Image (cartoon, rainbow, N blue to C red):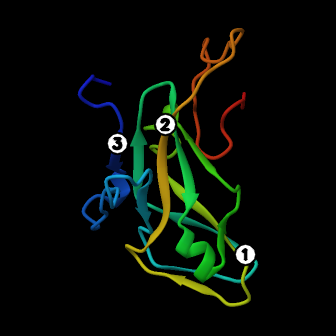
Amino acid sequence: MTAERMRGFEVVSDYEGQGIRLPERKTASSAGYDLEAAVGCIVPPGELTLVPTGLKAYMQPDEVLSIHIRSSMAVRQKLVLMNSVGVVDADYYNNPDNEGHIFIAVWNRGQEPVALKKGERIAQGIFIRYLTADADKAGQGAERLGGFGSTGQK
């Protein structure tokens, strides 16, 4: 990655030409980049739905993209992230399993189905720099080879 490309978003190849918008911050003090649904879908009550964004994120090796549900989705639609906060690691970008495609794992806590429209803002991503412990050995020969739950797999 060049110094000119520090962090950002790209459309994954399967969604090129399908009107996917790159995430934006809406105000100067907004921390999060709004992530939209790449397709329309229904989230049944009490169920998990993986909503594709059509996006991948690139960042520096000591950064992570933290995914959070938009407050309007939580309050009005009763949607939460299945894992509370999503974590997109730097080495998820362009991984061989799914090109680093970011999905939003939403769970409907309500009693009614929730219809999400293509292009609807459902989550926000916040780039965060993190620290590691002195004796950390991660990265010494380990390479990500998959998508969801792939870290630590042999």
What SS does tag 1 mark?
loop
Q: Which of marks 1 and 2 is in front?
A: 1
Q: Which of marks 3 and 1 is in front?
A: 3
Residue at 53%, 75% in the rendered image: 72
Residue 28 visible here: yes
Figure check: 65 above or below 142: below
Side (left or right) of 30 relative to 63: left
Residue 101 visible here: no
Q: Nearer the viewer, mark 3 or mark 2?
A: 3
Q: Earlier in the sequence, mark 3 or mark 2?
A: 3
**Cβ atoms under marks 3 and 1 closer than 8 Å:** no
Q: CA gap, disc 3 to disc 1?
A: 31 Å
Percent from the top left, x then y, of residue 152?
Answer: 72, 30
Residue at 34%, 42% in the rendered image: 8
What SS does tag 3 mark?
strand
Percent from the top left, x then y, of residue 154?
Answer: 72, 27
Residue bearing the label numbered 3 = 8
Residue bearing the label numbered 1 = 47
The residue lying toward the viewer, choosing from 138 and 13, is: 138
- Inspect the image, locate mark 2, and give the three-letter code of the amino acid beneath it: Asn
